[in-house]
Image (cartoon, grey):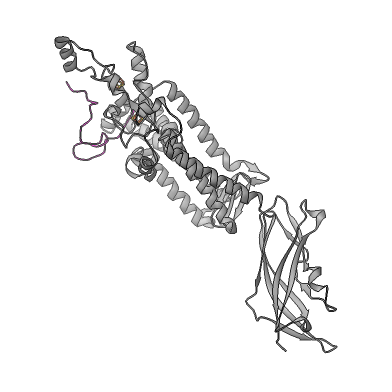
């Protein structure tokens, strides 16, 4: 008699003969990997919830404020003009992930992807708590609606909604900051209509995905799941069934053949435990499949069976795609390429970050008239040019800045050029970006062919800053030709 867990040869285990979805209720499993995955999931969930509340140098540890183009990444403060650095941060993370995949296969999917962590570590636990074991859940699915089923389903979905709201609010804190999030929670939704709609939309997506769609996302939608097959090589780790040891598996036919013709059966007792615990509904004994998210449940399940029947564990285990490579495992060529690229991007990032100046400034000519003239009481003509100075405080402290014309620019002139601004000094808080209007007034006599060059200087007031800033930039002054 065929087991009810025997999968159709040509159809996904998650669909029936009419193509309708079969909702997966993977059986509970215990063992080494289950234990460590549980601990990892608890750590990652706490990390995700706590990270936006951690501060480094008074700033949120991780903040990705897209609207203000302000990014804080573990003490590294980036603004819009630092976008090349942001690209390097993303490149480092990307190549790092490729390296991990090339060596350890789909370890990201099984151990660290938010999809797996939240479904396995939270949503399925709630479901198990309210509705019982996998068998009881399947029975409840098949049962007609009753008061008890209605209560169980209502409580379950209410808890799912609460968890989704917590996840969404934590997620939002990474983008708007915890302080703004607190204000938004306390104020009317109408005051933050855009963020409120985003929150509703994100909650709906999370509820749909983690509570209902589940591992179908991994097998049908996730682009990274597909992409990983390109990144992985023959030496990458996969969860694999040792068919040389397991086959011929113990079935009524193989047993009677062995009885009649002699011969030895393999170690697989054909109990289907590995199929029952699989969240993506596959039979790992059919070889490596795209649907396998390397969750290791089948390893624990089979180890439990092997222990019970007195055989060595490891019939299903972490192995390389080509098992012989497991014995000579070192870094494969793909892994070396990804590691090299990761190291290059991280060293470039470190170089740029360490050479970042505490103050960034650019001087732009204002869009008003190129110059204006003023006739003095003694008949001499003064020319005025209008500039805009863009400043960004990239250091660790607030700055108090003074603007001026560098001494060397005025050294040979009896009538020095002077800088006029309403911001003298200008207080620039850490991470602040400001644009200030400045005017340079100078005697017409310094112009040659209608032009002259001076250097604008910016200094901080040492008493107010730990860093001494003395920066200069040359600008071209323009005025009348004669
Ligand atoms: S085959 Fe095993 S490792 Fe892969 S998804 Fe199923 S249970 Fe997890
Ligand atoms: S759990 Fe192990 S013994 Fe049981 S069917 Fe799977 S591979 Fe065979």
The quadrant in which residue 236 appears is top left
| Side of 217 where 470 appears, left or right | right
Instruction: Characterize the magenta stretch by its predominant secondary structure.
Output: loop
Please state, as top left, top right, bottom left or bottom right, where the C terminus lies in the image. bottom right
Q: Position of residue 188 (x, y in %)?
A: 54, 53
Q: Residue 409 sits in which quadrant?
A: bottom right
State the residue at coordinates (70%, 86%). Answer: 480
User: In this rendering, would 341 be left or right of 303?
Assistant: right
Q: Residue at x 37, y 44 (%)?
A: 227
Where, by quadrant of the figure, is residue 155 drawn?
top left
Magenta residue check for 117: no
- Compared to residue 206, the image places residue 442 above or below, namely below
Q: Quadrant of ligand 2?
A: top left
Q: Which residues are magenta?
A: 1-26
- Relative placement, left or right, of 308 versus 175 is left
Left or right side of 101 for 249 = left
Does the rendering let one see residue 480?
A: yes
Residue 269: horizontal and vertical position, in percent? 27, 17
């Amino acid at each position: 008699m065929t087991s009810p867990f025997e999968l159709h040869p040509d159809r996904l285990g998650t669909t029936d003969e009419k193509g309708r979805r079969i909702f997966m209720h993977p059986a509970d499993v215990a063992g080494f990997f289950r234990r460590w995955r549980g601990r990892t999931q608890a750590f990652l969930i706490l990390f995700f919830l706590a990270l936006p509340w951690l501060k480094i140098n008074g700033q949120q540890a991780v903040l990705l404020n897209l609207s203000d183009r302000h990014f804080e990444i573990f003490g590294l403060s980036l603004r819009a003009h630092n976008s090349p650095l942001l690209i390097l941060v993303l490149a480092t993370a990307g190549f790092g992930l490729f390296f991990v995949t090339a060596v350890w296969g789909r370890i990201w999917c099984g151990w660290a992807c938010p999809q797996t962590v939240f479904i396995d570590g939270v949503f399925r636990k709630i479901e198990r708590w309210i509705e019982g074991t996998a068998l009881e859940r399947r029975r409840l699915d098949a049962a007609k609606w009753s008061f008890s089923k209605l209560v169980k389903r209502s409580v379950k979905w209410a808890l799912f909604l609460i968890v989704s709201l917590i996840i969404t609010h934590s997620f939002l804190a990474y983008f708007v900051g915890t302080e703004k999030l607190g204000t938004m929670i306390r104020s009317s939704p109408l005051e933050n209509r855009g963020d409120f709609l985003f929150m509703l939309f994100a909650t709906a997506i999370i509820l749909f995905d983690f509570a209902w769609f589940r591992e179908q996302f991994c097998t049908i939608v996730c682009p990274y799941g597909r992409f990983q097959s390109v990144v992985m090589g023959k030496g990458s780790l996969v969860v694999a069934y040792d068919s040389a040891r397991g086959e011929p598996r113990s079935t009524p036919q193989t047993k009677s053949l062995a009885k009649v013709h002699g011969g030895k059966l393999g170690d697989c007792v054909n109990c289907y435990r590995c199929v029952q615990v699989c969240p993506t509904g596959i039979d790992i004994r059919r070889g490596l499949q795209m649907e396998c998210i390397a969750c290791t449940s089948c390893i624990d399940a089979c180890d439990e069976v092997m222990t019970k029947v007195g055989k060595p564990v490891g019939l299903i285990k972490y192995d390389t795609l080509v098992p012989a490579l497991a014995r000579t495992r070192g870094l494969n060529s793909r892994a070396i390429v990804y590691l090299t690229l990761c190291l290059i991007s991280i060293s470039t990032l470190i170089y740029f970050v360490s050479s970042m100046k505490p103050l960034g400034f650019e001087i732009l000519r204002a869009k008003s008239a190129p110059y204006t003239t003023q006739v003095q009481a003694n008949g001499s003509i003064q020319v005025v040019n209008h500039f805009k100075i863009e400043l960004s405080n990239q250091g660790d402290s607030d700055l108090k800045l003074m603007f001026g014309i560098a001494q060397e620019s005025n050294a040979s002139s009896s009538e020095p050029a002077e800088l006029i601004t309403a911001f003298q000094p200008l207080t620039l808080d850490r991470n602040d970006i400001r644009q200030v209007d400045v005017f340079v007034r100078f005697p017409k006599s310094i112009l040659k062919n209608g032009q002259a060059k001076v250097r604008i200087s910016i200094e901080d007031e040492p008493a107010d800053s730990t860093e001494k800033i003395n920066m200069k930039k040359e600008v071209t002054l323009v005025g009348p030709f004669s």
